Image: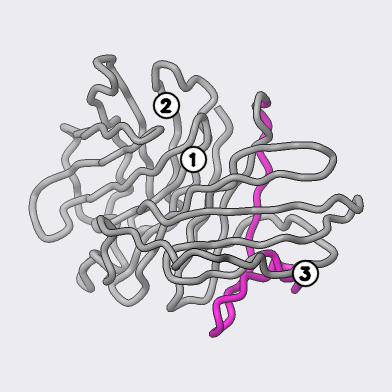
């Protein structure tokens, strides 16, 4: 399984050549189940304890790890295609040591195992391996949330005039003004990494300073032209 490592939303660049905002007739979407403030405690900002949030492709979903964030609990909540699974680990947290542990549970009645790893200071969180029945080619993007920078997860799709369709999932932090994630064409196993910055008005630019989409509330959308001359449309909604 391919590993994606993102310490602070530093991800490979996907290049675009132009972008424009897509008009919307409906009110902006709001994720009623999503938190509005960072859940991570300040005491855990420089520790392997705390909150780690991620998105996955294969099919599409989110995951959140809570490593003794104010309690002694070590758990993860994963949602794949709208179905939730609570995962737990029996590996104890040790101060000053990296935390590497398998998290296990069930999804749709079948056993799931995901091995999570993070350095002792909370850096380079990643999924080392995963066994998710029905989702053999899952790819994860994981980052650590800090007490002053809420991390949000968005699941979405893209389509092009090539034609091509696929999944477009990202993580973002409005306080940090950064975003990043992964995309995958439908029916394929390879993924593309994407990343960039967010302006104060909610415009998402890639690392080449090209506008990709606009963030409004808990919704992202945009239409742009890629470097092959294809028109690409992206649309996503916050789910984490």
Mark nearer the N terminus (3 vs 1): 1
Q: Of the numbered discs in the image, which one, if any, rests on residue 140? A: 1
**Magenta part of the chain:** 188-212
The span from disc 3 to disc 2 (Cα, nearest Å) is: 33 Å
The residue sitting at 47% across, 76% down in the picture is 176
Where residue 22 appears, as percent x and y from the top left, is 66, 65
Q: Of the numbered discs in the image, which one, if any, rests on residue 208? A: 3
Q: Can residue 48 be seen? A: yes
The residue sitting at 48% across, 57% down in the picture is 171
The span from disc 3 to disc 1 (Cα, nearest Å) is: 24 Å
In the visual, does 170 lie left or right of 164? left
> Which residue is denoted by mark 2 in the rendering?
130
Above or below — where is 192 with respect to 223? above
The residue sitting at 33% across, 68% down in the picture is 146
Q: Are marks 2 and 1 in contact (CB under 8 Å)?
A: yes
Q: Of the numbered discs in the image, which one, if any, rests on residue 35? A: none
The front one of 18 and 8 is 18
Where residue 41 appears, as percent x and y from the top left, is 21, 68
The residue sitting at 28% across, 47% down in the picture is 65
């Amino acid at each position: 399984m391919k590993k994606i490592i993102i310490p602070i939303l530093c991800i490979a660049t996907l290049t675009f050549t132009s972008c424009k905002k897509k008009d919307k007739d409906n009110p902006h979407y709001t994720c009623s189940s999503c938190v509005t403030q960072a859940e991570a405690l300040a005491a855990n900002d420089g520790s392997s304890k705390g909150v780690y949030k991620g998105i996955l492709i294969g099919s599409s979903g989110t995951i959140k790890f809570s490593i003794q964030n104010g309690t002694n609990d070590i758990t993860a909540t994963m949602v794949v295609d709208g179905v939730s699974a609570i995962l737990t680990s029996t590996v104890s947290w040790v101060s000053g040591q990296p935390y590497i542990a398998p998290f296990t549970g069930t999804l749709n009645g079948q056993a799931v195992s995901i091995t999570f790893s993070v350095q002792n200071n909370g850096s380079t969180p990643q999924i080392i391996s995963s066994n998710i029945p029905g989702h053999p080619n899952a790819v994860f993007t994981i980052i650590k949330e800090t007490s002053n920078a809420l991390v949000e997860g968005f699941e979405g799709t893209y389509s092009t005039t090539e034609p091509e369709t696929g999944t477009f999932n990202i993580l973002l932090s409005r306080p940090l003004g950064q975003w990043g994630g992964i995309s995958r064409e439908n029916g394929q196993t390879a993924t593309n990494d994407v990343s960039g910055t967010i302006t104060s008005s909610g415009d998402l630019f890639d690392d080449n300073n090209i506008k990709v989409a606009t963030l409004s509330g808990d919704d992202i959308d945009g239409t742009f032209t890629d470097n092959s001359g294809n028109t690409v449309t992206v649309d996503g909604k916050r789910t984490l």
